């Protein structure tokens, strides 16, 4: 039983970080945008889950009361309703994901627009500040996501009963596989080459007629939409949104560490990086409890130092990561010849 | 007796100005947006705490220790990580990632140190201020007078250093054009090392005075970092005088601006204070990315007048 729990937990963790890191790979790895605000789009997705589906259902069921203040009792009634209605659950789930994608795009555009023409340093700062700002709003503006206490989200997996976490983990992982194929398709298309051109030499790319500002904005919109999916899925999976938990360390820095470990601008590399890192983290968590009685401080901080040192060592000794970047796949010669004949 | 909010504004703005000067120095010379800069200030704050509570020394006697410690951290970051990496041809973005990661290493150590002080010396090290340890000048806390004086004297010393000494001239030359400065015999690496040391030291100085009035915690520098970015951008990132001005304006806007807004809109606004640097950054990037010292005021004004 414990093994299955471990596996499911692993599946969900890998799933959410895979989606996040693939989206980071799209903007930071391929397009060269130093996105230090990955957490921003993640929070955006989580806020959509906190804000929309619960209120819509409360309105449909005719529940009275304030959604934030009477959250626990309302969510209880909503979940009872959702447990008996599979179709409604699925529809609500899909609708929320679609709204999250839209909101993610908006957030991606708004956060990138101010500094996109100025340079990569200013862009990095704006994105970072936006991520922190979104968290500040979430913590202080209670109607959005319950303020600093957090809020429960409707359980769209309630129909599965005791197997709720199994279904949620599998759905999360399935989404991550779909995102992998989507990002892989995107980056192996001519678009991927264009993104690398923008990353490697902006002036040369511009001279070839590429609209750099447009490319960067669109890339950030797509990658933020993907990260918003991760945020929404994770909020559904955990059943709650707590704004204080969306820190820069856990949702921006760790995806960066995963991407650099696996190999930036290489999707297979990112997958290997995420798996290695999640396994490493599980080991650390296991040894953490054994180590903690001997140390006069929280082992959590040692973990943070470890990740930081790891990233620095990767940058120093193996900047290409576990699996280095490869050239874009093209059609083989025979196929091209056939196409030319036809 | 001076109103607390006035003191809040002055102390915060002055210390922010000190930090912005250092941050802008690094930005001007090596073109690196140093994301680990804030945590170097926190190191200074913890030196003050240790000096006051563990060593039982007057705080002002130990601000030089804070200067040297933070300077050495900054120097080590440059000498052992930034320089080797740039020699290997890493992109500028890669260096941002480096400082971003280094920030988390520093944060980890600061948190560990805070836990250590809490558990071993039974101090309140996770949330502290040292207002009681401050000296009184004419009935007001000393930090209110000392911190603006510090900011202004730093800029005067830096001005004299940059314009009156041979090394300062070499420094300006390196900022202007590193390869050319190198070809006329300036030791560019030495100039960069000293710049990073000085900049880190300024963060340490500001950090050492921080707990004398403002509530400190291990992440305080990391939080103030956003204000430093905003102040540096507001001042135009290519001038230390602009940095001083930007620091004062951004700091006062943050403290006094929020309290003025709170008077109009209600006290709920105060919690949104961290959004002010973000607003400054966004507004300046959209309207005047060159900052207030970069705008050609005269040209703009005459154009306006001619149009009329």
Image (cartoon, rainbow, N blue to C red):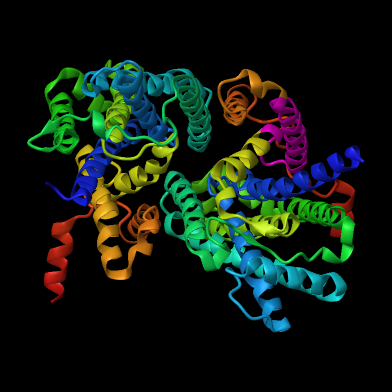
Quadrant hosting residue B269? bottom left
Question: For this rendering, which residue is in front, A139 or A281?
Answer: A139
Residue at position x 53%, y 45% in the image: A36
Comparing B96 with A53, the one in front is A53
x%, y% of residue B201? 30, 24
Residue B251 place in picture, x, y as percent: 26, 48
Classify A121 as above or below B284: above
Q: Quadrant of residue A48?
A: bottom right
Q: Main secondary structure of the magenta part?
A: helix
Tell me how many marks there are. 0
Question: Is residue A282 located in the magenta-colored stretch of the structure?
Answer: yes
Up the image or down, B251 lies above or below B257; here it is: above
View extreme (left): residue = B138
Q: Residue A204 versus residue B68: which sits nearer the camera? A: B68
In the image: residue A337, left or right of residue A110:
right
In the image, farthest residue toward the right: A1
In this view, A305 is above or below A211: above
Left or right, A17 with reference to B240: right
Q: Residue at x 29, y 17 (%)?
A: B56
Q: Which residues are magenta?
A: A261-289
Q: Position of residue A155 (x, y in %)?
A: 76, 64
Residue at screen point 39% across, 54% down: B278
Quadrant of the frame with the C terminus of chain A = bottom right
């Amino acid at each position: 039983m414990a093994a299955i729990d471990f596996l499911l937990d692993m599946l969900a963790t890998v799933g959410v970080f895979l989606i996040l890191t693939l989206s980071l790979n799209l903007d930071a790895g391929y397009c060269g945008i130093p996105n230090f605000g990955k957490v921003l789009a993640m929070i955006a997705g989580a806020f959509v889950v906190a804000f929309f589906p619960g209120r819509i259902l409360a309105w449909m069921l005719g529940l009275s009361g304030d959604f934030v203040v009477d959250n626990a009792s309302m969510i209880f009634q909503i979940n009872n309703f959702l447990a008996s209605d599979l179709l409604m659950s699925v529809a609500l789930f899909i609708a929320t994901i679609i709204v999250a994608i839209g909101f993610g795009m908006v957030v991606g555009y708004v956060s990138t627009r101010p500094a996109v023409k100025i340079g990569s340093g200013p862009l990095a700062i704006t994105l970072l500040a936006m991520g922190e700002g979104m968290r500040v709003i979430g913590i202080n503006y209670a109607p959005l996501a319950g303020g600093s206490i957090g809020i429960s989200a409707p359980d769209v997996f309630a129909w599965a009963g005791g197997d709720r976490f199994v279904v949620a983990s599998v759905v999360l992982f399935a989404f991550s596989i779909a995102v992998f194929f989507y990002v892989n398709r995107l980056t192996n298309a001519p678009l991927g080459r264009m993104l690398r051109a923008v990353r490697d030499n902006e002036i040369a790319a511009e001279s070839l007629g590429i609209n750099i500002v447009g490319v960067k904005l669109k890339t950030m919109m797509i990658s933020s939409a993907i990260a918003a999916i991760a945020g929404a899925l994770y909020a559904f999976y955990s059943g709650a949104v707590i704004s204080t938990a969306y820190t820069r360390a856990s949702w921006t820095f760790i995806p960066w560490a995963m991407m650099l470990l696996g190999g930036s601008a290489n999707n297979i590399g990112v997958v290997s990086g995420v798996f290695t890192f999640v396994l490493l983290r599980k080991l650390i968590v296991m040894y953490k409890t054994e180590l903690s009685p001997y140390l006069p401080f929280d082992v959590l901080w040692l973990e943070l130092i470890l990740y930081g040192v790891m990233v620095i060592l990767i940058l120093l000794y193996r900047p290409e990561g576990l699996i280095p970047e490869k050239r874009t796949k093209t059609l083989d010669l025979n196929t091209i010849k056939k196409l030319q004949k036809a | 007796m001076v109103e607390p909010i006035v003191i809040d504004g002055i102390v915060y703005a002055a210390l922010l100005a000190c930090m912005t000067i250092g941050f802008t120095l690094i930005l001007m010379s090596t073109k690196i947006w140093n994301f680990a800069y804030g945590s170097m200030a926190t190191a200074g704050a913890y030196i003050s705490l240790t000096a006051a509570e563990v060593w039982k020394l007057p705080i002002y006697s130990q601000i030089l220790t804070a200067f040297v410690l933070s300077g050495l951290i900054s120097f080590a970051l440059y000498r052992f990580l930034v320089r080797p990496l740039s020699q290997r041809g890493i992109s500028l973005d890669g260096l941002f990632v480096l400082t971003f990661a280094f920030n988390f290493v520093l944060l980890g150590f600061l948190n560990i140190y805070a836990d250590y002080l809490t558990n071993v010396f039974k101090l309140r090290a996770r949330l502290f201020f040292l207002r009681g340890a401050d000296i009184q000048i004419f009935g007001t806390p000393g930090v209110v007078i000392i911190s603006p004086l510090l900011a202004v004297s730093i800029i005067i010393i830096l001005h004299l250093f940059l314009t009156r000494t041979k090394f300062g001239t070499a420094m300006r030359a390196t900022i202007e054009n590193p390869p050319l400065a190198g070809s006329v015999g300036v030791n560019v690496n030495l100039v960069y090392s000293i710049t990073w040391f000085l900049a880190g030291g300024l963060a340490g100085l500001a950090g050492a005075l921080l707990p004398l009035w403002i509530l400190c915690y291990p992440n305080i520098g990391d939080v103030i970092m956003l204000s430093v970015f905003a102040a540096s951008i507001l001042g135009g990132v290519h001038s230390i005088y602009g940095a001083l001005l930007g620091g004062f304006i951004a700091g006062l806007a943050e403290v006094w601006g929020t309290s003025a807004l709170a008077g109009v809109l209600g006290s709920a606004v105060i919690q949104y204070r961290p959004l002010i640097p973000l607003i400054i950054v966004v507004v300046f990037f959209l309207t005047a990315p060159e900052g207030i010292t970069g705008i050609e005021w005269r040209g703009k004004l005459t154009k306006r007048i001619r149009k009329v």
